[in-house]
Amino acid sequence: MVSIEIKAACAGVLLLFLATEVQSQTILIDEQLTGPVRIAPFYFATTEIFGASSAPVALAVGFVPASIATAFGELGISFALGGFLVLDGFDQLHPFHSDSFLDANGYLSFEAVFFSTVNMLGQQVTFWTQCAAADPAAAAGFTLGNTVEVQEHTPVPVVFTNSPNYAAEGGILTITGANFSNDIGLNVVTIGDMPCNVTYATSTTLGVEIPLGCTSGPVTVSTPWGVCNGHTNAINSWCAIINGVVTPEQAPVLTSGYMTIQGFIPYSGFVDTFTVHALAGQEIYAECYSYDPNTGMLTGGSNSSNLYFDPVLEIRHGTVDLFFDDDSGPLTGAAIGLPWGSSGFVADMEADYQVRVRTVFTGFIGHYLLKIGVRTPVNMPMRVHSVYPNLVRPGDFVSVWCSNTIPGVLEGHFVNAFGQTLPAAGVVAGRMDFQVPAGARSGPVSITTPFGTSPMDTDRMSAWLTVLQDTMAWEIEGQTPTVTTSTTWFGSLAMNWDHDVYRVQIRANHHYRIEVYAFDALQTRVMTSTFAMGYPVDPDLRLLPAQLSTPILAMDSSSGPGVNALIGSSLTPYYTNSQNTYIDVWVLSWFMGSYGDYLLNIVESPPGS
């Protein structure tokens, strides 16, 4: 058996047989079809032959492919344009016969080809090589192996960093990476979906002009050899589009366009608030990033200035939270109105709205870069942003902030909730109102407009309605109340090891749905509990036999919206028992020692309901 191997070796190494091998492919001559072999620019290609020391071989190399039938097989190489053949002993009288046998180890290094130093189309080297070897079974005494194409091949481009990774419209972004083309015209760069003008190019660096109208997004570089897609969740492939930076103290009320603020969250619970005046039907958008003032770069949550900072964005009108985002944009960023994240928010009336910045993790602080703006809506997928109030009873009217409404038109506008499709009682820009029907129970809300239907999101507290029961009471610390019917309880976990117990009288074959939510007593609402030290609580539910701590009959820590708990969903079924009995409902803190106020719904349904 004889084989040839094509290897790539660094061009800076003069002794090829000692060069560090960076790419290798073996091609056997027994008609196995392999290849082409691809060698990157700036490398040598070395052809090596392996086989028994007594096996005479011939090697053909050419720069033009062919398909010529011979008695020994198909010759795939043309000898025009510099092709050549090396014989090693098929003719015993050949003058180089004694020099061209494979050595005692069955090895021969034949030739090195230096590939071009310019990675441009039309200037890349390609050659074809083919091996012939003695074959006693063949009529002619030897056979031709398969023809192997060896290409100089530029790998797919790679982006390492964008510097700086924010820039103004019309500014210049420097992209550092590998495998770019030296020909400016062969590099195609986009930020998000916007093509950019490339101003200069080397194999490792591109200069890019930020076009007018460009929005923040991942940077993608394409060459004729492949595409490096920017990752929507990786800050190193991201470019934020900003204007002149101001401090929070300098930030005016924004009435048009956008502005950029460089701020700082100095302690746990601190909130920065900025005002945007919007007309009914205008979109308010925002982006917030962890920022390192020492390097002047947007970063992940940790950098030389921030131990850890993960921003949260909120839009408010008065004291009502209308929008919330903590994870759109690149990792440890937040955004409202980016195509690669949360949908945009449409103002339902002309008013001053507040854009608020805080941190996900209480106890962490940090520097941030915030862009806020107002514009004609451009990114409006169907979605419910928030509902208010989110604690309701049958008969209450609820406002649903959403997108894709037609102001003043009731026809074709519906709210989907409680397993029903309910007509809108009022429609304005960015908002629909409806009335809670009799028999409603807690659950998510979606909307239907003439433009379509939004997803029914069971995991977002901001699109969830909690239905209060007719009987309500406040938990009394140290007591275990007995619950005999559907009841809403308000309670508090004072410390992370605290737990409250409610004794429930179970009736045979009745269904019991049990919900627990983080509760904001000041604003009288349930809220999303975040992974946080302390308030708000991240609740856990456990059902146990009365007065016992084992066994656990049912439990849940996250089946409700956000990280609230729910027994009685598709993930955690209703609790039922075939006989009359008592069980204990335990309300606990589940994650990171959180504590705070909660709302507990215990909902009893008769058999068959």
Image (cartoon, rainbow, N blue to C red):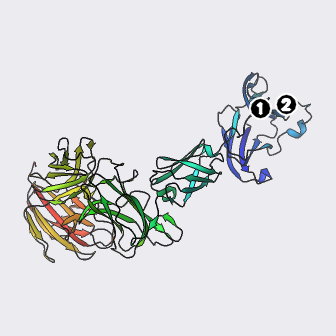
Q: Amino acid at mark 1?
A: Ala
The residue at the point 24 percent across, 69 percent down is: 588
399 is higher (above) or lower (below) than 93? below
Of 9 and 49, nearer the camera is 9
User: Helix, strand or loop at disc 1?
Assistant: strand
Say which of 53 and 304 sits in front.
304
Q: Position of residue 63 (x, y in %)?
A: 75, 34
Q: Point out residue 480 in the picture as x, y percentages from the top left corner.
A: 13, 73
Residue that carries the numbered disc 1 in the rendered image: 132
Please tell me in which quadrant of the rendered image residue 373 appears: bottom left
Label for residue 90? Answer: 2
Quarter holding the N terminus? Answer: top right
The crowding category of the residue bearing disc 1, from other C-alpha atoms within 10 Å (few below 14, some 14 to 19, many at least 20), is many
Q: CA distance from mark 1 to mark 2?
A: 10 Å
| Coordinates of residue 599 in the picture (x, y in percent) | 18, 66
The answer to whether one can see residue 557 in this image is no
Note whether 249 is above or below 120 in the view shown: below
Q: Which mark is residue 225?
A: none
Q: Compare marks 1 and 2 and give the one earlier in the sequence.
A: 2
